[in-house]
């Protein structure tokens, strides 16, 4: 079985994003970039399935600028067999919206015919949490979102996910779309030998036009601002004082 894994190049999770002085967006100049953490978990799941003998090939795909090749090389070093970069313009204003990403992934899905698609549930730059669900709708395939456990059994996959009341397990016919949550796995670190091997693994470069997808944005960002500073808390001397204070703030009835 072939597994398709999508990965995205985002600001490293350890970096505090800065807003541009004109409020037009996030400043990406001289900022460390890395693979989206949820996508790292997706790659890890795909590699583990291959190690179990469930998968025979892992194809990593990314939609982004030329520098996204670095992210794909990381996926290859973790264990993916080959990669596809759907290259978009380098300027920050050309960020591809989730629907366009889903349309491109749908075209790649049709071309590659994978038995399973594994992807992070969301990207930490926009937190949209839309692409996996949109891809499932476009392909007409079943979806298992926020996966904390994945088990492939023949031509079906069981996906366990956390819900308000505990755990829910859904059984999906393959091919299926699975989005990963943080509790699924701890991603492995790529070893130096695997990093070296990744340099020689196939990496194809295509464009959105090759798949007939228009990536022109449908949304317009009016302004980006820093979150409001959190106000300091207050210390009260008793429960009665706390209740009175909450009433003053309109919190308590």
Image (cartoon, rainbow, N blue to C red):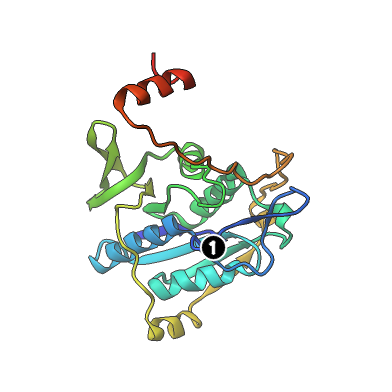
Q: Position of residue 182 (x, y in %)?
A: 35, 52
What residue would you read off at disc 1?
A: 15
Q: Residue at x 50, y 68 (%)?
A: 83
* 43 w.r.t. 131: above or below: below
Q: Residue at x 45, y 85 (%)?
A: 196
Residue closer to the observer: 137 or 189 = 189
Q: Residue at x 36, y 47 (%)?
A: 175
* 53 w.r.t. 236: above or below: below
Identify the image quadrant of the N terminus: bottom left
Q: Position of residue 244 (x, y in %)?
A: 39, 19
Identify the image quadrant of the C terminus: top left
* 62 w.r.t. 195: above or below: above
Q: Residue at x 74, y 48 (%)?
A: 23
163 left or right of 194 in image: left
Mark 1 Cα shell of 10 Å, populated few (<14), some (14-19), many (≥20): few
Residue closer to the observer: 217 or 116 = 217
129 left or right of 153 in image: right
Residue closer to the observer: 106 or 113 = 106
54 left or right of 105 in image: left
Mark count: 1
């Amino acid at each position: 079985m072939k597994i398709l894994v999508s990965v995205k190049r985002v600001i490293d999770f350890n970096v505090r994003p800065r807003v541009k002085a004109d409020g037009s967006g996030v400043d990406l100049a001289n900022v460390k970039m890395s693979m989206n953490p949820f996508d790292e978990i997706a790659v890890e799941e795909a590699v583990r399935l291959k190690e179990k003998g469930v998968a025979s090939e892992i194809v990593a795909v990314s939609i982004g600028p030329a520098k996204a090749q670095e992210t794909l090389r990381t996926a290859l070093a973790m264990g993916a067999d080959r990669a596809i970069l759907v290259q978009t313009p380098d300027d920050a204003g050309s960020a591809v919206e989730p629907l366009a990403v889903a349309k491109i992934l749908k075209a790649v899905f049709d071309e590659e015919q994978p038995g399973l698609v594994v992807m992070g549930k969301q990207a930490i730059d926009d937190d949209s949490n839309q692409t996996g669900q949109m891809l499932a709708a476009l392909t007409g395939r079943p979806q298992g979102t926020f996966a904390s456990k994945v088990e492939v059994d023949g031509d079906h996959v069981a996906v366990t996910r956390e819900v308000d009341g505990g755990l829910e397990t859904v059984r999906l016919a393959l091919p299926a779309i699975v989005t990963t949550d943080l509790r699924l796995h701890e991603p492995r670190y790529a070893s130096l030998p695997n990093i070296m091997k990744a340099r020689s693994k196939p990496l194809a470069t295509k464009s959105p036009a090759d798949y007939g997808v228009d990536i022109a944005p449908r949304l317009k960002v009016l302004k980006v601002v820093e979150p409001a500073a959190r106000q300091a808390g207050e210390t009260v001397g008793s429960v009665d004082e706390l209740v009175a204070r909450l009433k003053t703030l309109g919190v308590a009835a």
